[in-house]
Amino acid sequence: MVNEAHPPRAQDLEELRALQKTGREKDDKVHAKHLESLSETLRSNARETGPRVVKGEPKHAYIPGSPRSLEASGSQFAKAVSDTGLKPVVVYHNLTPAELYEKALQYEPSTHIVSSGALATLSGAKTGRSPKDKRVVREATSEKDVWWGEGSPNFEMDEKTFVLNRERAVDYLNMLDRIYVFDGFAGWDPKARKKIRVVCARPYHALFMHNMLIRPSEEELAEFGKPDFTIYNAGAFPANRHTSYMTSSTSIDLNFKAREMVILGTQYAGCMKKGVFTLMNYWMPKEGILSLHSGCNEGKSGDVTLFFGLSGTGKTTLSADPNRELIGDDEHCWGDDGVFNIEGGCYAKAIGLKKENEPEIWNAIRYGTILENVVFDEETREVDFDNSKITENTRASYPIEYIDNAKLPCVGGHPKNIIMLCCDAFGVLPPVSRLTKEQAMYYFISGYTAKVAGTEQGVTEPEATFSACFGSAFLVWHPTKYASMLAEKMEQHGTRVWLINTGWTAGSYGVGYRFKLRHTRAIVDAIHSGELGAAEYETIPVFNLQVPVAVTNVPSELLKPSNTWADKDGYDRTLNNLADLFKSNFEKYADGGGFVSAEVAHTIVKSGPQ
Ligand SMILES: Nc1ncnc2c1ncn2[C@@H]1O[C@H](COP(=O)(O)OP(=O)(O)OP(=O)(O)O)[C@@H](O)[C@H]1O
Ligand SMILES: O=C([O-])CC(=O)C(=O)O
Ligand SMILES: [Ca+2]
Ligand SMILES: [Mn+2]
């Protein structure tokens, strides 16, 4: 029976659908300004003006003779269009997560919704950063500031080659049916923040930067204007291997003078966030602000802690603390007013994630969160966080406010404590030590961690990594520039420094085991409660590190690794071997790098292992 009491409000389906959505009047002037600015961003080097940029679905942008109409007529020449001047570019500017979900699900075959509501996707062949393919343009305005040569992460490129790669990326983007732009900020201090524009081909990349940058308000977006820096992400398109300097089909190129970055041949989203970080590592020290690869949180009394550490050492895991407000998990600046986060979101390692161990991160994995390269059940859409079939480096990207006790805005006072994290797979460094000022410099410049050599069967030898300032891959200036700024700030604010090993004990990887997360957390709690500031210490040999005799909720025998090794000779040998690795790594800093005197450098060297 038809219910005549409720006659339809619409006469046909189209009318019915029109009733479904409401919209607000948009300011035409703001709209036109955005289109003009987007067109300028997409201008190729070879043209006076940018392409015709339109908003809305491509069908509205249909023009006779365009590649679309050729495509519609079944022409085999559909894709063979060289004249981008006649092709309109449909640009989606600062879409909301809901809109980006829809685009991703519609156009990206590898993108799915999982049971928590998060968006699972694949980054393609590259599932981690490509530091060897990162290049910095050598040009007059920045040349003298940049750390070049041996040990530096900044492989050079000339301006001409950058233009070639930029053109390749821009042409690729202009030929697509639809592209995505996200405008946002880097840096929570309004005085220091930079306007970042990301142009990309994949909705997933736009959602990633929506999560990772600081999201502008409607007013801020209306007044955004010219960006300070633009990222062209053409990651699905390879670099031309015949171009100078290209060592592979991947190329990530930074140009400080042009204020641009070009990504070719990698879709791993982390490249974009660490590109922004590299930029800040160049710009911030120029303004007297120290940028750091670190997590950050704040206690109830307003005491701030920075967590330094290389990838996988525990910055994200340990900065998420139920008793403390999260300021950020990966990139911070320390200026005259205190600290501020660079980012608007977190990028957590997801491998082995368990609700019991990391409830804050677990709960952040929901609608709006991107899950990169995870494996899930085809029917139930339950994620198997233990599965590393695609990569060990599975990741979750979410806005910082998805962590319940995040502090917004993400700023804090001057740090009371600095915790330097390492994951020592050799199993010889103590779970916690208190560092002197000189030791703090030594361990900061050394930037030690040791990874397990690989996930292959039978490979048990850990591999030591020394990465200056716990993030050499992202540095622009010489490491001693950051180190001398850190020394000055710590001195001025009386910051205490601790070294925590979140890695192995009772033997190297393969024999011993990784410190339990609950023990590491108990150590962090003891630092924050003041317990370790007042504790009794003894000094262990070779590294001359001061180790507490007792820590609440940590078995005392764990505090000195020599206690936990069954093979005592093996312990001594491994300890001395690691000391030698530290010493030979530090040789290159013995002269102070021009930023600290040779005399100061000498006292720092003396504080390392002997
Ligand atoms: N004792 C421990 N302390 C800290 N983390 C531990 C410990 N034991 C295991 N882990 C695991 O180690 C990993 C630490 O990774 P985390 O994401 O915190 O690294 P990160 O320092 O933030 O690196 P990145 O800069 O790459 O983001 C997590 O997967 C965590 O579950
Ligand atoms: O940059 C990335 O891809 C992840 C990260 O935080 C790091 O490696 O330090
Ligand atoms: Ca992290
Ligand atoms: Mn990081």
Image: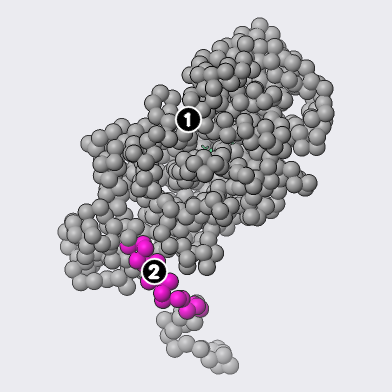
Q: Majority secondary structure of the magenta segment?
A: helix
The residue at which mark 2 appears reads as 33
Amino acid carrying label 2: it is: Lys
Front one among 188 and 179? 188
Q: Position of residue 548 (x, y in %)?
A: 78, 23
What is the residue that sits farthest to the bottom in this orientation? Answer: 5
Q: Tell me the tag on residue 433.
A: none
Whether residue 32 is in magenta: the answer is yes
Whether residue 592 is in magenta: the answer is no
Region rendered in magenta? 22-39
Front one among 208 and 375? 208
The residue located at (60%, 42%) in the rendering is 334
Q: Tell me the tag on residue 478.
A: 1
The residue located at (64%, 23%) in the rendering is 438
Q: Position of residue 14 (x, y in %)?
A: 42, 81
Q: Earlier in the sequence, mark 2 or mark 1?
A: 2
Q: Is residue 235 left or right of residue 442?
A: left
Q: Position of residue 140 (x, y in %)?
A: 34, 39
- The answer to whether the beta carbon of the residue marked 2 is less than 8 Å from any atom of ligand 2 is no
Amino acid carrying label 1: it is: His
- The answer to whether the beta carbon of the residue marked 1 is less than 8 Å from any atom of ligand 2 is no
Quarter holding the C terminus is top right
Quarter holding the N terminus is bottom right
